[in-house]
Image (cartoon, rainbow, N blue to C red):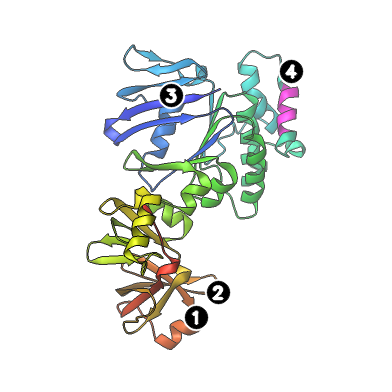
């Protein structure tokens, strides 16, 4: 059971090729306006691309070259949006039974199927309630049951946790992890926790194009895009590989290879050919590894970056200091001792051993 799509929507700047394997969940992530919802609309049949094709389990959903275009209800996909969009005049069980009934199932059989799916999403006690009588989390559980009762070959989820409170979201994540285990799905999310819990693979969209993709943990541990680094809470400096570091304009970030003898560096480059000089590379390091000084600090071996503070934010039990596109996490006491304030010129210092350097 597989899905593939290639689609271009010139008016929205989308140009994407994507595959989803059998029982695979792919998280599509990216900044606002990157084209995530446009991609789902194309797959669901709500938007026609200028060029492209899509195939689900060997069946063509659309092919612009030969004019093939299946309407949404014939595609075998189900779209779960941020809002549950339940029929207000129907009970929970009748909402869930709507799909099976539309497919021709007898009323009793459709109700039986609806009851099974309501139980699956832990909503069996909501059977006769109408949407106005449901909380946000309850309504979203019923919406999931309704989508699954239609037995979709591909499930599309557009930020299903976005409108939920902090108490409802964890339950919904657990439910989705269970029900997505045996079916292909594409989920749009801005939340790294959603990706870690639900997705086998992450695709990062920026400007309507895929800029990064790979296994979820790998993308978050070794991000190659600023967006993925932001999700993982890491400082991200793209540039050009130079010796043991990355050159980014006037800024050079040294990694743990700093101080190696010339022969040792050559051996490292042979072992890791992707780190050879003059190739695009990135330097990544956590804000917790960054110290803040009022004067330039030197040590063995350290990176020291002059920055102007733009923001001071509460972060956990400390303060996150932002400046120069970088972030440092320090204690509240340290911030007070240094007298930090927006507009101040300071130095962000990070040991080379805390920096990861890899090819972009």
Q: Residue at x 22, y 62 (%)?
A: 249
* Residue 41 x/y as whole percent: 42, 30
The Cα–Cα distance between marks 1 and 3, rounded to whole angstroms, is 52 Å
* Residue 80 x/y as whole percent: 54, 34
Q: Is residue 296 above or below residue 223?
A: below
User: Residue 109, which numbered label?
Assistant: 4
Mark 1 or 3: the one toward you = 1
Mark 2 or 3: the one toward you = 2
User: Residue 332, which numbered label?
Assistant: 1
Q: Residue at x 31, y 82 (%)?
A: 296
The Cα–Cα distance between marks 3 and 4, rounded to whole angstroms, is 28 Å
Disc 4 crowd rating (10 Å Cα; few below 14, some 14-19, many 20+) is few
* Secondary structure at numbered mark 3: loop
Mark positioned earlier in the residue sequence (3 or 4): 3
Left or right of residue 328: residue 277: left
| Residue placed most toward the observer, 178 or 279 | 279
Residue 17 seen anywhere in this rendered image of the structure: yes
The Cα–Cα distance between marks 2 and 3, rounded to whole angstroms, is 47 Å
Disc 2 crowd rating (10 Å Cα; few below 14, some 14-19, many 20+) is few
Mark 3 or 4: the one toward you = 3
Mark 1 or 4: the one toward you = 1
* Secondary structure at numbered mark 1: helix
* Residue that label 3 marks: 45
Residue 46 seen anywhere in this rendered image of the structure: no
Q: Is residue 113 magenta?
A: yes
The Cα–Cα distance between marks 2 and 1, rounded to whole angstroms, is 8 Å
The residues colored magenta run: 111-118
Q: Is residue 279 above or below residue 129?
A: below
Mark positioned earlier in the residue sequence (2 or 1): 2
* Residue 255 x/y as whole percent: 38, 64
Mark positioned earlier in the residue sequence (1 or 3): 3
């Amino acid at each position: 059971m597989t899905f593939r799509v290639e689609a271009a929507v010139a008016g929205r700047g989308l140009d994407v090729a994507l595959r989803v394997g059998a029982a695979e969940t792919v998280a599509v992530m990216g900044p606002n306006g990157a084209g995530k919802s446009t991609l789902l609309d194309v797959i669901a049949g709500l938007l026609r691309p200028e060029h492209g094709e899509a195939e689900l389990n060997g069946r063509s959903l659309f092919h612009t070259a030969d004019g093939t275009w299946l309407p949404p209800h014939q595609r075998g996909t189900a779209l779960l949006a941020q809002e549950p969009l339940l029929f207000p005049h129907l009970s929970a069980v009748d909402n869930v039974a709507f799909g099976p009934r539309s497919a021709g199932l007898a009323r009793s059989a459709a109700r039986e199927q609806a009851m099974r799916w309501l139980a699956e999403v832990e909503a069996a006690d909501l059977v006769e309630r109408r949407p106005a009588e449901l909380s946000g989390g309850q309504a979203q559980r019923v919406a999931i049951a309704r989508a699954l009762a239609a037995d979709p070959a591909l499930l599309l989820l557009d930020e299903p946790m976005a409108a939920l409170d902090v108490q409802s979201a964890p339950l919904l994540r657990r439910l989705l992890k269970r029900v997505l285990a045996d079916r292909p799905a594409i989920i749009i999310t801005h939340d790294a926790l959603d990706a870690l819990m639900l997705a086998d693979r992450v695709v990062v969209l920026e400007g309507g194009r895929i800029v990064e993709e790979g296994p979820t943990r790998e993308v978050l541990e070794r991000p190659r895009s600023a967006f993925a680094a932001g999700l993982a809470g890491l400082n991200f400096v793209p540039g050009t590989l130079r010796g043991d570091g990355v050159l980014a304009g006037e800024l050079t970030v040294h990694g743990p290879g700093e101080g190696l003898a010339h022969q040792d560096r050559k051996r490292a480059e042979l072992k890791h050919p992707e780190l050879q000089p003059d190739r695009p590379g990135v330097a990544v390091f956590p804000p917790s590894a960054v110290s803040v000084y009022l004067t330039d600090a030197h040590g063995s071996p350290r990176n020291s970056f002059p920055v102007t503070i733009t923001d001071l934010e509460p972060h956990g039990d400390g303060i996150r200091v932002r400046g120069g596109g970088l972030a440092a996490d320090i204690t509240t006491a340290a911030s007070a001792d240094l007298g930090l304030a927006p507009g101040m010129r300071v130095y962000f210092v990070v040991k080379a051993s805390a920096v990861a350097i890899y090819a972009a």
